[in-house]
Each structure stands twice: as structure tokens, then as C-alpha cells.
Image (cartoon, rainbow, N blue to C red):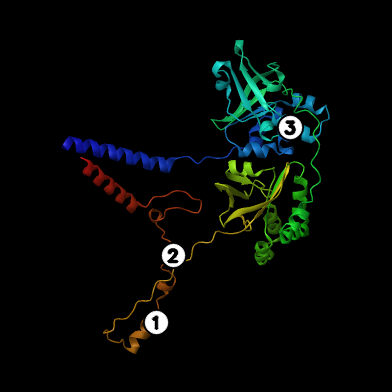
Amino acid sequence: MQLRLTMASGTLATVLSLSVLLLVLSPTSHAHNITRLLAHHPDFSTFNHYLSLTHLADEINRRTTITVCAVDNAAMNELLAKHLSIYTIKNILSLHVLLDYFDAKKLHQITDGTALSATLFQATGSAPGTAGFVNITDLKGGKVGFSPEENNGHIGVFFVKALEGLKYNISVIQISKILPSDVAAAPTPGPAEVNLTGIMSAHGCKVFADTLIANSDAEKIFQESLDGGLTAFCPLDDVFKAFLPKFKNLTASGKTSLLEFHGVPVYMSMPMLKSNNGPTNTLATDGAKKFDFTVQNDGEEVTLKTNKETARITGTLLDEQPVSIYTIDKVLMPKELFKAEAPTPAPAPAPEEAADAPKASKKKKKKAAAPSEEESDSPADSPSDDPADQTADENGSVRFDLANLGSMLVGAWLVVLSML
């Protein structure tokens, strides 16, 4: 019996210790940034530039489990010599973004020697049939070939080397040249001219639209983003009208940032919003200040969360690639401009005097009515300075209440003893 108790206690202690260590030491995952990854390779600067120009970089950064098939400057110069429109170039480059993870090791260990991968071109819905898929084949002699599905197995593009990667998240590899695709290279007309503020004004967001028009810097950013892709979230009139006093108290740059915070520099349909939960860059994102919010969904409802509030998407005003416009029920307030409001503690009830208690003398009342300086400077609801009494800091770093941890250990011991 004693042996069993000793073994059980040892096992329990080990499990609890490992659990605590995992919670404390688990690394925080950081989103990848394709622009920064390729910045380490000057020979791919043109490819990198066009990923940003076409807004494909934003789409790549939001996704996980992805492979970017990059080509060097010489291969990009051959593509640019054809003088294609930016919309056609976007289609071609989107064919080079595979929606799966392939590093050098996996390329040489493809099951049955061949794999078919979907691409961003296929995900946009612009590729008919299977034109947006790419075949990857492990060939003899250590070569790996790439061919768009529409080319009936003809292989003319090959894996060169691995460039960058985050295990099982993003792999950036070099291929020998641009993937040939008549479908992706077909002339692509530009989007029809969109009257962004006109659409907003006509569908219940006139106050926000008028405020955007009055801010030339913010309006310019929205207009310049239309061609490459834009998703706008406009607060309904009653909502933004109630917010105007706070808006007017912001600095000029703060007003611009808040308006830009309501736009995402890439087209996002409702299905994309529902499937791409997580932090999302905005038109206000500049690197030094993050200015992002979190997209979340619960069933059919999609919400946008900041540290101040959670706004719900209430309607769709436009959803035609490359522009989508949605209405929301709250103004999005970035943490860079507004601090999170801590919940107000409920006031403590005043102590009731006992019915038979003797009345205090006037002298004692006067003495009690004057609190000491030390008491007046130390409110009862002020946070403790002891880190062990705090469960989280401002950045969300996890900490442990030592008393609670002790209670957990005692409780776990009792469970084990009851089982023996």
C-alpha cells in the first residue's frame, strides 16, 4: 500500500510539474512576414516588391501552412518584359503560392512521387476548373519538377533551393522560372470604378463616409487600395454619431489612424473572414505601431475585436473582388489610441451599527472622520505589488497565484488517495 501511494504521489507530482512548466515556458507563436523573409535575399527583390504591390504579401502573412515558390530577379524581368497589367501579374504570382507546406525534405519524400497542391490563384475563384492547381513531382536524379495542372503533366520548372522557412508554417523556396499558365496570364480587366463613400452613404453609414471624405489623408489611402484589394468596415450612423465627441478629441494623426483602422488592404469575402480568424493588419498598420484587430467567428456571426470592444458585422454593402464593404455595430478603437477600460469595482457596503451599540462621543467621531494620510493614499482596491498575487500583466503574460497552486496540489492528492 505504501509503495502504491509513493508511486502515485511521484507520478502526480511529475504530471503537475510538467503542466506548470508547459504553461510557463510555452513559446508565443509569431506570425510570419514574407516581405521580411525575402528581404534577406536581394536577388529576389523584384518578386518581393510585386508581392507587396499586388497585396499578395498580406494574404500570405495571414495564412499558415503555406509555400511560396519565389523566382529571382532575372526570371521576374522576363515576366515584366511582357508588359502585363498589374491584375494579370497578380494572378500569375498567386499561382506561385501553394496552400500546403513543402520544405526541401518533404519535396524529396512525396508519397507516390507526385502531389497536387491548390494555390492562392485557385482560392480566389478566378481559376476555372483545375487551372489553379500545381503538380509537384519527385523526379529521378534528385530533381523536383513543378507544373500547373492545365499543362497535362509537362514539366519545365524545377526546385532550386530552400530560402527561408518556419517549420510547418511557411516555406519559401526558389524555383527555376515562372510557372507557365495561359489561364493565369490571360488579360485581366481592372475592377470597375467603385464609389466607396457613395455606397457607404446610401446604406446607413453616411456619418462615417462624410468624416472619411473630410480627412484627405485617410480617404487617399482608401482610394489607392481599391485596385489591389480592400475590405472596409463602416460603423452605422447612430454608432459613429455617438462616437464623434471622442473622435474630435483625437489629434490630427490620431483621427487619420482611426479612420484607416477601419480598412484592410486586401479583399476579404465573408467566407474568407469566417475561415481566417486571427490578428489582421489594417490600413493604419505601419510597423512601428501595430494597429491590428482580431477577426473571430461563432457560427455565422463574424466579429472584430480590439482591447476596447468587440464589433459585430451586421451587413454586406458590397462583395465584388477586389472590394468588399461591411457594416459594423461599433466603432473600432485601436489600443494605440485608447487604453482598455478596467472594470469598476462595486463599492463596499457601509457597515451597519448595532441597535444596542453605545453612541460614540463627539470627540471620537471627529477623530474617526479624519483618515490618516497613509490611508488616503492607499485605496483598498489598488493592485498588489507582489507578482505572486497577480495573475496577468498588461501584455497578457501568464503568472500563477501560489496559493491557488497549493490548493490544486492538495486537491489532486485527495483525488489520488480516494482512488487507492
Quote the CA–CA distance across marks 3 and 1: 76 Å
Residue carrying label 3: 91
Q: Residue at x 35, y 76 (%)?
A: 351
Name which quarter of the figure residue 97 lies in: top right
Quadrant containing the C terminus is top left
The single residue placed furthest to the top in the displayed view is 141
Residue carrying label 1: 369
In the rendering, at what x and y percent does residue 170 appear? Answer: 59, 32
Q: SS at mark 1?
A: helix
Mark 2 or mark 3: which comes first in sequence?
3
Residue carrying label 2: 382
In the rendering, at what x and y percent does residue 392 appear? Answer: 45, 53
Looking at the rendered structure, the number of numbered marks drawn on it comes to 3
In the rendering, at what x and y percent does residue 37 appear? Answer: 63, 33
The single residue placed furthest to the left in the displayed view is 1
Circles 2 and 1: CB distance less than 8 Å? no
Q: SS at mark 2?
A: loop
The answer, for residue 30, to whether it is visible in the render is yes
The answer, for residue 109, to whether it is visible in the render is no
Q: Residues within 10 Å of mark 2 (few under 14, many from 20)?
A: few
In this rendering, position of residue 253 left or right of residue 308: right
Q: SS at mark 3?
A: helix
